[in-house]
Image: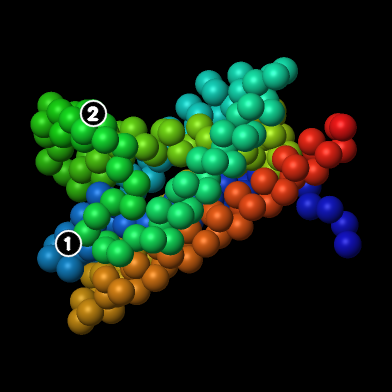
């Protein structure tokens, strides 16, 4: 079976990761759930579009500003270990989530203050700006993408050049935008088409997948240590 071109691998990596990180219930999903049932598909989809744009910006920043630095010298193995621990932690939090009304990962009071202050200062009125500002104020999104950018580059899922990075970022846009658009459409139909239980189950599946990735990375680290010795 022929290998996929690196640019296609990078795009698929971005698409799958964008989708997985959009599923766990957070401010955007809850806003779409509330607004979609009340104001219809168009309003909810515009919230999702604003959120997608900011998600792509954060992903782009992670790849262009951090991934290359963390992939150098002795920093690379240390960051591999950190990304394994971080992804394991996030996966466990997703799997153990018990309610869609609470964030599975909370970065503390300081992060909450940043989010509140930013929203109060910008005070978004349109649906698009509501989605954009809520992701902008969620510093956890940038942290996630920095760790994932490191993971993807260090495991050759994304080549450390512009075509590879841009293909991954584009894939993230498609995956994230596709999820928010689909969620907006389902919610706008009403009639309990998407229950809290169903959302929570999808969050658990997302966590399981992240744990599988973490285990693969852990096994890879152990193999490299054994091979080195």
Question: Percent from the top left, x then y, of residue 159?
Answer: 71, 34
Question: Percent from the top left, x then y, of residue 134?
Answer: 25, 40
Q: In which quarter of the image is residue 188?
A: bottom left
Marks 2/1: CA–CA distance: 26 Å
Q: For this rendering, which residue is in front, 158 or 206?
A: 206
| Crowd class of label 1 (few under 14; some 14 to 19; many from 20; radius 10 Å) | some
Q: Is residue 33 above or below residue 191?
A: above
Residue at position x 80%, y 43% from top? 223
Residue at position x 21%, y 43% from top? 130
Q: Is residue 98 above or below residue 167?
A: below
Question: Percent from the top left, x then y, of residue 61?
Answer: 48, 27
Question: Percent from the top left, x then y, of residue 76?
Answer: 67, 26
Residue at position x 41%, y 33% from top? 142
Depth-wise, is mark 2 or mark 1 nearer the camera? 2
User: Which SS class for mark 2?
Assistant: helix
Q: For this rendering, which residue is in front, 23 or 82?
A: 82
Return the residue at label 2: 110
On the rendered structure, is 182 left or right of 43?
Answer: right
* Residue 45 appears in the rendering: no
Name the quarter where the C terminus is drawn.
top right
Return the residue at label 1: 34
Residue at position x 34%, y 74% from top? 198
* Residue 201 appears in the rendering: yes
On the rendered structure, is 7 left or right of 185?
Answer: right
User: Which SS class for mark 1?
Assistant: helix
């Amino acid at each position: 079976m022929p290998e996929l071109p690196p640019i296609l691998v990078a795009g698929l990596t971005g698409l799958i990761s964008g989708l997985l990180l959009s599923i766990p219930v957070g401010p955007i999903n809850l806003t779409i759930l509330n607004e979609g049932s009340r104001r219809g598909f168009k309003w909810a989809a515009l919230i999702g579009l604003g959120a997608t744009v900011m998600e792509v910006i954060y992903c782009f920043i992670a790849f262009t500003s951090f991934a290359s630095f963390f992939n150098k010298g002795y920093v690379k193995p240390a960051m591999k270990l950190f990304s394994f621990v971080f992804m394991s932690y996030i996966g466990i939090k997703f799997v153990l989530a018990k309610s869609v009304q609470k964030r599975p990962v909370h970065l503390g009071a300081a992060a909450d203050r940043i989010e509140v202050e930013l929203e109060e200062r910008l005070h978004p009125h349109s649906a698009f700006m509501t989605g954009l500002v809520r992701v902008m104020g969620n510093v956890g999104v940038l942290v996630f993408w920095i760790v994932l950018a490191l993971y993807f580059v260090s495991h050759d899922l994304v080549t450390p050049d512009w075509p590879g990075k841009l293909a991954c970022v584009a894939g993230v846009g498609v995956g994230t935008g596709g999820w928010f658009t689909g969620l907006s459409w389902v919610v706008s139909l009403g009639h309990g088409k998407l229950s809290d239980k169903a959302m929570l189950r999808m969050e658990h599946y997302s966590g399981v997948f992240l744990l599988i990735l973490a285990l693969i990375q852990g096994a890879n680290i152990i193999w490299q240590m054994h091979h080195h010795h």
